[in-house]
């Protein structure tokens, strides 16, 4: 049985997606690199090998694609047949799941981007690597400081009745403003709701500046798991924001689809 593997190695996480010849996902996994991407890739390869042995030993990996900020490193380690940038990979995955998609909002561990699509093709994009405000690492840090499990962060936002205005243009000002608002007695749920609103404002005025955001809008990347951020985007845009299947592994899914569409005669995959 032919299968195609997509690997996305970013600043904080590594994602694996295995698909069949129809583009159906057979397996996916996502883990933090802990600052050691090579070891994380090796662990994920071992997990995939065990999964194949236990679920369908007839699976044959016929092509491998890599994407993400460490795509070239990953390509060397695994033996990639195709190496693609994140924009192309995310656009492919998003348009496969929602063919009419027009906008992809992607917020990961340490960066954020926006992709504008027409007829399934990326026609414009913008990326932000310079400011950490609104990224996964920043939200993790604020949740930790407030003593809130990051998994509960979004649920707390939805309980807010009166979100507090938080200075969100800079991570330093944002943190100091949150501390100040706590000290003068604002409720934690109002602070985190205000934080999400502020981070969305920051994203729209910086990353998405000058971009026409049209529906359908897909929200992907690790931060899309945060229902509070989704709520804040919908409130700011006045439009529905879709968190699709495989939202955390969209880049890996997309590059797996791309290598399936352009399969090598003989894969360079080094094996397990």
Image (cartoon, rainbow, N blue to C red):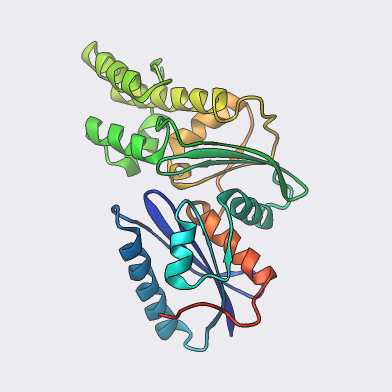
Residue 98 at x, y = what percent?
Answer: 68, 52
Among the 4 quarters of the image, the one containing residue 183: top left
Among the 4 quarters of the image, the one containing residue 227: top left
The image shows residue 271, relative to residue 125, as above or below, that is: below
Instruction: State the residue at coordinates (43%, 20%).
Output: 169
Question: In the rendered image, which quarter contains the C terminus?
Answer: bottom left
Q: Can see residue 247?
A: yes
- The answer to which of 253 and 181 lies nearer the viewer is 253
- The answer to which of 3 and 186 lies nearer the viewer is 3
Q: Can see residue 160?
A: no
Of all residues shown, which one is farthest toward the top?
A: 184
Residue 236 at x, y = what percent?
Answer: 56, 24
The image shows residue 39, relative to residue 133, as above or below, that is: below
The image shows residue 235, relative to residue 74, as above or below, that is: above
Among the 4 quarters of the image, the one containing residue 193: top left
Relative side of 4 to 228, left or right: right
Instruction: State the residue at coordinates (34%, 21%).
Output: 174
Instruction: State the residue at coordinates (41%, 15%).
Output: 165
Question: In the rendered image, which quarter contains the N terminus?
Answer: bottom right
Residue 6 at x, y = what percent?
Answer: 53, 65
Instruction: State the residue at coordinates (35%, 59%).
Output: 37
Residue 114 at x, y = what percent?
Answer: 59, 38
Relative side of 11 to 230, left or right: left
């Amino acid at each position: 049985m032919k299968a195609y593997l997509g690997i996305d190695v970013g600043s904080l996480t590594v994602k694996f997606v295995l698909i069949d010849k129809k583009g159906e996902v057979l397996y996916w996994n996502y883990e933090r690199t802990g600052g050691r991407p090579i070891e994380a890739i090796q662990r994920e390869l071992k997990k995939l090998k065990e999964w194949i042995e236990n679920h369908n030993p007839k699976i044959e990996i016929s092509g491998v694609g890599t994407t993400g900020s460490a795509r070239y490193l990953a390509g060397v380690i695994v033996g990639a047949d195709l190496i693609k940038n994140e924009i192309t990979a995310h656009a492919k995955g998003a348009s496969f799941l929602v063919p009419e998609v027009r906008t992809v909002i992607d917020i990961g561990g340490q960066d954020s981007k926006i992709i504008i699509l027409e007829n399934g093709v990326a026609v414009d994009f913008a990326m932000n690597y310079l400011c950490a405000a609104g990224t996964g690492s920043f939200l993790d840090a604020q949740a930790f400081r407030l003593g809130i499990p990051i998994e509960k962060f979004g649920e707390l936002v939805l309980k807010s009745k009166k979100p507090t205005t938080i200075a969100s243009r800079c991570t330093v000002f944002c943190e100091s403003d949150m501390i100040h608002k706590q000290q003068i007695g604002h409720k934690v749920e109002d602070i985190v709701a205000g934080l999400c609103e502020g981070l969305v404002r920051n994203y729209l005025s910086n990353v998405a500046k000058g971009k026409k955001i049209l529906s359908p809008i897909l929200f992907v990347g690790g931060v899309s798991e945060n229902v509070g951020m989704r709520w804040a985007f919908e409130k700011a845009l006045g439009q529905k924001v879709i968190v699709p299947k495989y939202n955390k592994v969209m880049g890996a899914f997309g590059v797996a689809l791309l290598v399936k569409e352009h399969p090598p005669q003989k894969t360079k995959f080094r094996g397990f």
